[in-house]
Amino acid sequence: MDRSTTTRPAAHRAAAEERVLRKQAAEVLWGNWTGTSTVPSRALYPHQWSWDSAFIAIGLRHLSPLRAQVELETLLAAQWGDGRVPHIVFNDAVPPGAYFPGPDFWRSTTAGRPSGAPGGVRTSGLVQPPVHALAAWLVHRADPGLSRARSFLARAHPRLTAWHHYLLSSRDAGGAGLAAVVHPWEQGMDNSPCWDGPLSRVEPAGPEAFRRADLAYGAPEDRPTDLDYGRYVRLAAEYRDRRYADGRAHGAFSVEDPAFNALLIASEYALARIEHELTNTAEVLTRDPDERRTRARKLTETLVARLWDPRRELFLCRDLRAPGPDGELITERGVAGLVPLVLPALPPGIAAALVRTACGPHFGLGGPARLVPSYDLTGRAFDPRRYWRGPAWFNTNWLLEKGLRLHGEQARADGLRDALLDAAVTSGFAEYVDPYTARGSGARGFGWTAALALDLLLDDGRDERGGPGGLSEGEVQA
């Protein structure tokens, strides 16, 4: 038999597999597109989510830079007058009971009026991690001609600037310069064991106060418990009832999180690049980009001073409501503590320590774990299936792949990229997977899983020594 008809060189097989992956990922994104934005999942998450849309735009730019721009424009059009970008923008065409808590719970047009909630669209009142400036820069870079013709960056810039100003002023609950989150949903890793301590002080809402639409689409063993959900609802209702007012004295939950702040810093660098672009093309007069880069470096120093634990070789969350004048660090090890690896001005010794931690027994990268888990593999609360209490997520692993590459760990970054692409396909683009087996859980055909797999596959800058947005250490020091 002529073996050439049944086998092909490995490189050709890989190319064919990548073509299939691209096609399947594109089908997910086209299927989740509503006409103005992309839902994370048609069934479980039928509205627009803030940081989902940012990650989705990063992948969507490879298929349609125009749709990627519209994705971000739709989200930013729902921005509040105080600068916050809400974590959910509701689609009024979706039946009211399809998701809880829905627009009738948040009451943005009434309770949010003092903070400038828009009247023409209904939103939540919480926020999510600020990945948006980074996404806007990457989307611009995908087709600069189209972006300039539509004045995409010029129109997005004032909204992104107001968003960062809100976080660095109204959310500086600790007084040191970092942004604090007032609810686990804001940090994005909703169910992390890192929140167990702060949440223990919250009296849960009774079962009559909520109806869990999520359990209609996800197995109970994969989702937060009713006790945790009751606490989430209580916190959100109290924030709503104080008309979404921020301040150091408000709320039972106030936490400085390393991932949230690392993404804010990364987006500060991206805003500097946006401002450099706008100044060079004379589209708009902006501040000196060097000022923003200087602020990003200072914020990195503050992040290290406030949240770095040299004994654990990991960034930790700071509970600002714990006893003491400055709260206390939460000792649980979560993947949020590795995310600052994306920062180009991170001290080299700390970057090296984070790589050791990622590859050590707590996270298992390159060892027992196929993907980096959301929580300590050896931790008291580790569960490979339950939401953010152990499963691996594609957005955090995408960030770590960029961080590893930024800090010179090319082989580890390549290995993580390959594992992510394999897991995306074999899991059906699952919401999250078992870190050991890559068995999928949660929603299938999940938006950011497909989008970030596309980005890993198609980003022509992946072999450069640069982090998200291609930002290198040399550029930061320039």
Image (cartoon, grey):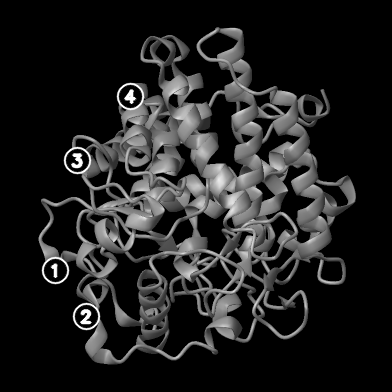
Of the 4 image quadrants, the one containing the C terminus is top right
Q: Nearer the viewer, mark 3 or mark 1?
A: 1
Give whichever of discs 3 and 4 has the lower sequence position.
Answer: 3
Counting residues from the start of the chain, the first of labels 4 and 1 encountered is 4
Q: CA distance from mark 4 to mark 2?
A: 37 Å
Q: Amino acid at mark 4?
A: Ser
To which residue does mark 4 refer?
A: 64
**Looking at the image, can residue 427 be seen?**
no
Left or right: 420 with respect to 23?
A: right
Mark positioned earlier in the residue sequence (3 or 1): 3
Q: Residue at left 74%, top 39%?
A: 295
**Amino acid of disc 1:** Gly
What amino acid is labelled 2 in the image?
Arg
Tag 3 residue: 34
Q: Give the mark, 1 or 2, whose residue is nearer the N terminus.
A: 1
* Mark 1 → mark 2, Cα distance in angstroms: 9 Å
Q: Return the mark for residue 211.
A: 2
Q: Which residue is mark 1?
A: 97
Are circles 1 and 2 on residues that touch, CB within 8 Å? yes
Mark 3 or 2, closer to the camera = 2
Pick whichever of labels 4 and 2 is earlier in the sequence: 4
- In the image, what residue type sits under mark 3? Thr
